[in-house]
Amino acid sequence: MKRRNHLGDWMLILVGFELAVLLYCLFFAREIIIEEALFLVLALFASLVLSNLLLTWTILISVGLGIVFLVAGVVYIPANQALLLLFSFPILVGILSKIRYYLFKEVAKVQNQEEEAEVAYRSLLESSGFQQEQKLQALLIHWSHEELFYQIHPREYNRTLNQIHYLIGHHLIQDERLYYVSDGNFLVLTNSQQRNLQEYYQLYLKNQLESLVFKGEDGNQAIQFQKGYLVVDSTNRTKFHSYQEAISNLKRQLETDIIVEY
């Protein structure tokens, strides 16, 4: 499984888009090159100070106002320049919002460990062998609505994610391994039979996790969790021989683990 560098991809898209706009202005629309430079400054400023929700509204409002002023005849400029002014700013804001999204993911202390989790799963499955008493336990803990919390406050999202990771890791015992597998999912793997991971989560860990709070701009907000649990033994080893089969099963279980909204 190859991990893509989404941040690098979007940076290249930004450079390519701005280069294309600059060249087009130089050859076909010199009159609006200053406006395009101003759009770049405004888009950079907006992406630094506005939340993702406000950035979305900025895109919608800019398109709406652009239609009013450029298409409805308030400003008389050539059609090609009008179209460039109409669409370049919202596209630029959209690209920068993606860059900001992946930038916050990159600087987070908790990084995606999907590749490490896959290697560990294969290793534990092989070490468990085919003996009936040997089992591999997999517990997936999911931070419910984590993407919504990210949209509200990316920096606080990263802080909370780090707290969750620390709390789960603090409660692990020998031979239990923790991996962050993206999108608010924390995977615990073990072939130890010292305790049942699902029972421990339900009786002890879940309450402690839900005691954490998300410190948003409007005050503290409670957070909730869902879980998926899988035991791989001699009866289902063939079915869950691959990590992808196991993680897909765990994620499907999240859909049936109903949380109570309050």
Image (tube, rainbow, N blue to C red):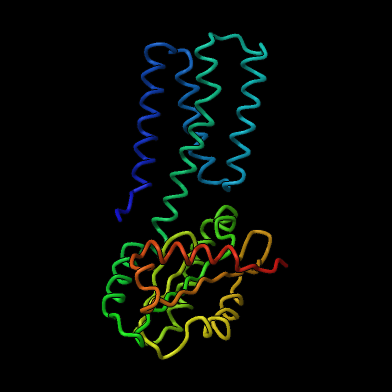
Corner quadrant of residue 232: bottom left
* Relative horizontal placement of residue 184, taking residue 72 as reference (left or right): left
In the image, residue 32 sits, relative to residue 245, either above or below, namely above
- Residue lying farthest right? 262
Measured as percent of width and height from the top left, residue 102 is found at 43, 50
Q: Is residue 160 left or right of residue 113?
A: right
Q: Indicate whether 261 appears above or below 232.
A: above
Left or right? Give the position of 114 relative to 140.
left
Q: Who is closer to the viewer here, 246 or 181?
A: 246
Residue name at image x 47 percent, y 86 percent: 196
* Residue occupying image coordinates x 39% and y 17%: 24
Q: Residue at x 48, y 67 (%)?
A: 250
The total of numbered circles placed on residues is 0
- Answer with left or right where residue 173 lies relative to residue 69: left
The foreground one among 220 and 39 is 220
Q: Where's residue 13, x and y in %?
A: 38, 35
Vertical relation: 66 (above or below) 52: above
- x, y percentage for residue 32? 48, 17
Locate residue 97, reporting x and y percent. 49, 43
Residue found farthest to the bottom: 194
In the rendered image, the quadrant that contains the C terminus is: bottom right
Tell me the quarter of the image containing the N terminus.
bottom left
Closer-to-camera residue (89/196): 196
Classify residue 211 by image quadrant. Answer: bottom right
Name the residue located 47 percent from the left edge and 65 percent from the top edge: 249
